[in-house]
Amino acid sequence: MSAHTPFLEHEAALGPLASRYVGVEALPWKPTPTPGIDMKILLQDKETGLLTALFRWAPGTALDLHEHVEIEQTYVLSGSIVDDEGEVREGDFVWRPAGNRHLARSPNGALVLSFFLKPNRFLSGPSAGQALE
């Protein structure tokens, strides 16, 4: 099975059909290519691009222009994320269709839970041409 949770204790000992109970607090924060945004990977399948992760945005962070290759879903646990289309605040949910392009920023910081079917493709900035993993 290619889907897994990095750093999940005892995952290797579980059978292929066993449930994975994830103690999120024990997972490490991993830096992303964007300074000011860290993530905890809850579920990842590198073969398909599937990713479920918590993202922690420091106040004032901006994410360069990127394209959502497949549907992206984000639920805001705290703070807010802003782009030219609007703002998604604590307790709100946004989803973006494949092909959506935008710049995102978090003036006051945020903690969000995001679901990706494929990694974003960055169109500007230092990550241009790369996919978020």
Image (tube, rainbow, N blue to C red):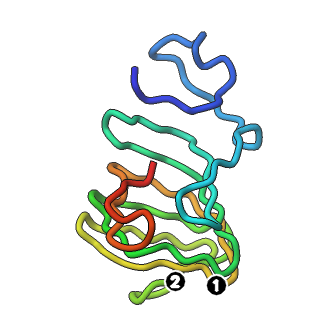
Percent x, y of residue 106: 60, 79
Compared with 120, 101 (above or below) is: below
| Horizontal side, residue 84 vs residue 21: left or right | left
Compared with 30, 72 (above or below) is: below
> Marks 1 and 2, how far apart in space?
8 Å
Upstream in the sequence, badge 1 or badge 2?
2
Percent x, y of residue 104: 48, 78
Given the image, on which type of amino acid does mark 2 rest? Val
Percent x, y of residue 42: 57, 41
- Which disc number belongs to residue 77? none
| Horizontal side, residue 26 vs residue 42: left or right | right
Could you tell me which residue is drawn at 60 percent across and 19 percent down? 11
Looking at this view, name the residue that lies furthest to the front: 126
Percent x, y of residue 3: 43, 29
Compared with 101, 23 (above or below) is: above
Residue labelled with disc 2 = 82
1 and 2 marks in contact (CB < 8 Å): yes
| Horizontal side, residue 18 vs residue 110: left or right | left
For residue 25, which quarter of the picture?
top right
Q: Secondary structure at mark 2?
A: strand
Residue labelled with disc 1 = 107
Q: Residues within 10 Å of mark 1 (few under 14, many from 20)?
A: some
| Horizontal side, residue 66 vs residue 52: left or right | left
Compared with 40, 79 (above or below) is: below
